[in-house]
Amino acid sequence: MVKLILSDLDGTLVPEGTSVLPEEVRALIIQLERCGIAFAVSSGRQHASLRQVFRGLDRTLIISLNGGCICRGDECLYTNPMERMDALAIAEDIYRLPTCDAILETHEQCWVYAPKGEIMCHELDRRNYRYRVIRDLNALEGEIIKVACYDESGRVGEKLEGFQRRWGERVKVARSGERWVDFNVSDKGQGLLAACRLLGITPAETAAFGDNLNDRPMLLEAGQSWVVASGSPALRAEFPTCRHPAEIIEKIAAEAKKTLAI
């Protein structure tokens, strides 16, 4: 029996960058909880942004920053920070690229390192991010859990190989959208395993949904996995597909109801 369902947010549960959870999805999460099935969102976004999307769903596990932080409500249950010197060096590497900004993320907020101008703050505003623009990395406070590169040009794929060559032996480097590359020591698979430990369940008792390559570690660890039809072709070649997680979640909830009735 599935005891935990995990889903990516952008491009999976909602369109990229959206900050409103559809009412039918909200109702399904409540239905799962009544059946004794936990729900977790697993996203590259920060906790504050995800908390806004899932407001009112206080039992939902929020796995933010690509598995680097797990919270329930405002209670932080788990973090997996980067080596600070690595994070700062990656930010400086990103800064040298003319169309890119570096975003360094802690549990509480993100820090936009933009010495050459505030290129991408509109994206953070759209996602309800808590952030501060800094010109000097010495101003950054707190454990750094994730660094992200935002490429305004939309050609982040051209930079991915260089990032992986320079940093792939130190951290996990994964494309998370047409304008984003993420750098972590954690990944969504490790986030799934940490959530299982917190709940006292096994990975075989989980189901997961994703759309992009940064979801692959989570899909590999889960007992059951699906990729949405609009997702990465490489993932669709590797995992079963569905139009939207809701169609599978409804079936899982229905099976759980039958079990409870018996």
Image (cartoon, grey):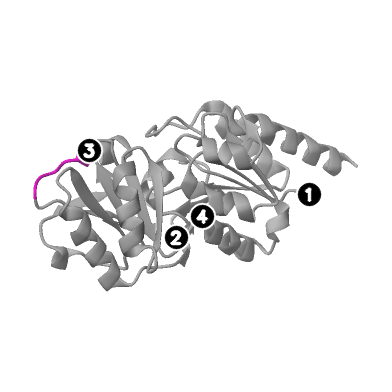
- Which image quarter: residue 179? top left
Q: CA distance from mark 4 to mark 1?
A: 22 Å
Q: Residue at x 51, y 28 (%)?
A: 22
Q: Position of 94 compared to 64: left or right?
A: left
The numbered mark at residue 152 is 3
> Which of the two discs, 3 and 2, labels the residue nearer the N terminus?
2
Label 2 crowd (10 A; few <14 / some 14-19 / many >=20): many
Classify 137 as above or below 241. below
- Which image quarter: residue 180? top left
Over which residues does the magenta segment extend?
Answer: 116-122
The residue that disc 4 covers is 188
The numbered mark at residue 1 is 1
Q: Amino acid at mark 2?
A: Cys
> Which of the two discs, 4 and 1, labels the residue nearer the N terminus?
1
Q: CA distance from mark 4 to mark 3?
A: 25 Å
Decide which of 76, 197 is in the foreground and name it.
197
Classify 193 as above or below 206. below
Tell me the SS state at disc 4: helix
Q: Amino acid at mark 4?
A: Lys
Question: x and y percent of residue 113 in the render?
Answer: 17, 54
- For residue 143, say whether it is visible: yes
Q: Residue at x 57, y 32 (%)?
A: 25
> Which of the two discs, 3 and 1, labels the residue nearer the N terminus?
1
